[in-house]
Amino acid sequence: MLIALLADIHSNLEAFRACLDDAERHGAARLVLLGDLVGYGADPLAVTRLAMERVAGGAIAILGNHDAAAIGRPHRMNPEAEAAILWTRTALDAEARGFLATLPLEREEEDRLYVHADASRPEAWRYITDAEEARRSMEAVPHRLTFAGHVHVPQLYGLTATEKITRFRPVSGVPVPLLRPRRWCAVMGAVGQPRDGDPAACYGLYDTDRSQLAWMRVPYDVATTAGKIRAAGLPERLAARLFRGA
Amino acid sequence: MARPRLTEGAVYDGFTIGPLLHRGGMAMLHEVTHPDHPGPLLMKVPLLFEGEDPAAIVSFEMEQMIMPRLYGPHVPRFIAAGDFSEQPFIVMERIPGTSLLPRIATLPLPAEEVAAIASRIATALEAIHRQHVVHLDVKPSNILLRESGEAVLIDFGLSHHLQLPDLMEEEFRLPYGTAPYMAPEQVMGVRDNPRSDLFALGALMYFFATGTRPFGDPLTLQDLKRRIWLDPAPPRALNPAVPPWLQETILRCLEVDPARRHPSAAQLAFDLRNPDHVAMTPRAAKLKRDGWRQRLRRRFDPDARPVFRRRTALPGAAPMAPILVVALDIGAPAPVLEAAMRATTSRLLATLPAARVACVNVQRHHWVASDSALDGSGRNRHVQRLVALRHWAAPLGLPEGRVTFHVLEAADPAAALLDYATANAVDHIILGARPASFRKRLLGGISSEVVAQAPCSVTVVRPRAGN
């Protein structure tokens, strides 16, 4: 079975739809949303409604820090993110807020754990940006595979039987075997706000039969998304960075 | 879970286990058969014992990742694999015959034979390099020759895939490889440079041409590192029958700095197949090792010590050291077209600093007038054409070694050009479009035939009308 893993959609409806279409074309049978449906972008309501539709159809959705902030569970954020969250609160309706409030911090499925940030304390929203942070996350949970987001840059960490940790920057579209008995922590790139220099939306495709994960890149209509961000009066940088993927 | 026993006659995962063919340090090889896969197959099973060198497991994992991704005649066809959750194994095509290992008993080999074997190996290396794999264990026992002539590379347990995690690199501090053949940068832990395989092939050529290993068979890391500052005795000092061009080629492969070796395996294969076109440097004439001053400097002077870096090129990018062919119709003067072709070539070269250009003129073979090689003024027409080719290329300002000149004779110019491009792993052909004319009708549109059938990119240069 192919599982599509979408993290950090950030109210970017065009990128969200492009990834869903691409995953469908590849035959993905399952959808996992790894958190941060909202924040930064100008389509929080449409994105949340689309996610609700998918969850009603069997998809899994996890809570992200921006989702939590949007429903009034504040934590420290940079000023741009903060400004976007204040605006997002006004854009969501009661139903959407109610949906976000039901999202869990993590979900497990067979040998897989889905979580937005570091799994050792999901509610602390710590980033996994290096091997030691990945080790902390992996050692705190029993699962063979952890799928996370939050960082907006694709990365793969592996933990060997001898407790050595490996780090790898995946190449777009090239499936990486997640060999047993190693344990792996895969950080998805962002659907709605990539930060690795490639403006294309990023999502993961995991093949459960072959235990292979590929980071996919999907071009989308950045100009439309950026136009909406500007029209909403959100900080200009949130629009401009989408063109650069930075 | 108890591991199933893979004994002769047993059936595992549809494969009938045949006789044990080989038991090495890291794995066992069984012959196996499968009703769905005709032909003899090989099952490789890692040896796993308590306290076993973890390298056996990791290298098996690497091979399991890499083998299913490789294709073509230069690797064994991958059939199936089983992972460590039950019984780890890899099943692949069994290549008939033996490796190059038994040849060691017959060394030294004549230069032509060394070049013939090495050019096939270089072609095989080019094939895997283009599939993003650096072999990192090129040695006689890992090379087989198919009956059809192609070299086949086996054992990808120490290999590096430029698009996959390198489990060996992350796991071990000491370099893994085979001591007599390991490139200096590999000794120092760099595993992502395809030119490391050219070094190993250079060591193999040296061994095959002289009967002596260039760096012996060092057993300690300290001794392994000697190759960074101690150059081997030139092959001609050991075997005077080694021609200068072969010594040039071998010593270029054995350069300590990877950047000084051939830019690609295809370019090395090109030299091995075209000995007359090897650009000679002082390497070709050397009869002694470098002097002690130079050696001491390389060993102790931090400024002279080589620094080995990982490659930063984007994995999956097109080859940075392509072979370009410019097909020039020197016979009929067409200055505007020739200038346009030079401009196109020059623009391509500007973005490809390691590219190499072969200027080719195809002469139509006239079966009847076989004594016409000398023209009226008595000059050899072949030489004249070479002079004309050099003249065309001179404004490009390419150093010797980056440009070669060839006159091919053939009854069918398009076919000759296509054969040339295939045999030499050419990446790009630049052709001129002739205006519709009597001549074009006569030649039947060479460019359209080349465009349709070329194994690579083709640029057809056509000057704007009125220029």
Image (cartoon, coloured by chain):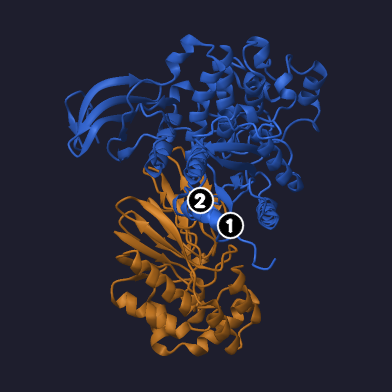
Chain colours: A orange, B blue
> Which of the 4 quarters of the picture holds residue B245?
top right
Q: Is residue B334 left or right of residue B12?
A: right
The N terminus of chain A lies in which quarter of the figure?
Answer: bottom left
The answer to whether residue A40 is above or below residue B288 is: below
> Which of the 4 quarters of the picture holds residue B44?
top left
Residue holding disc 1 = B434
The answer to whether residue B23 is above or below residue A158 is: above
The answer to whether residue B464 is above or below residue B85 is: below
Amino acid type at circle 1 is: Arg
The C terminus of chain A lies in which quarter of the figure?
Answer: bottom right
Looking at the image, which residue is at 37% across and 57% down? A206
Label 1 with label 2: CB-CB less than 8 Å = yes
Residue holding disc 2 = B443
Binning the other alpha carbons within 10 Å of mark 1 as few (below 14), some (14 to 19) or many (20 upward) gives some
**What element does badge 1 sit on?**
loop
Q: Are the numbered discs 1 and 2 placed on the same chain, yes or no?
A: yes
Residue A143 visible somewhere in the drawing: no
Q: State the separation of the CA atoms marked 1 and 2.
A: 10 Å
Residue B12: % across, % down = 20, 34
Figure disc tally: 2
Binning the other alpha carbons within 10 Å of mark 2 as few (below 14), some (14 to 19) or many (20 upward) gives some
Q: Mark 1 lies on which chain?
A: B
| In the foreground, B346 or B100 | B346
Q: Is residue B147 left or right of residue B405?
A: left
Residue B354: % across, % down = 66, 44
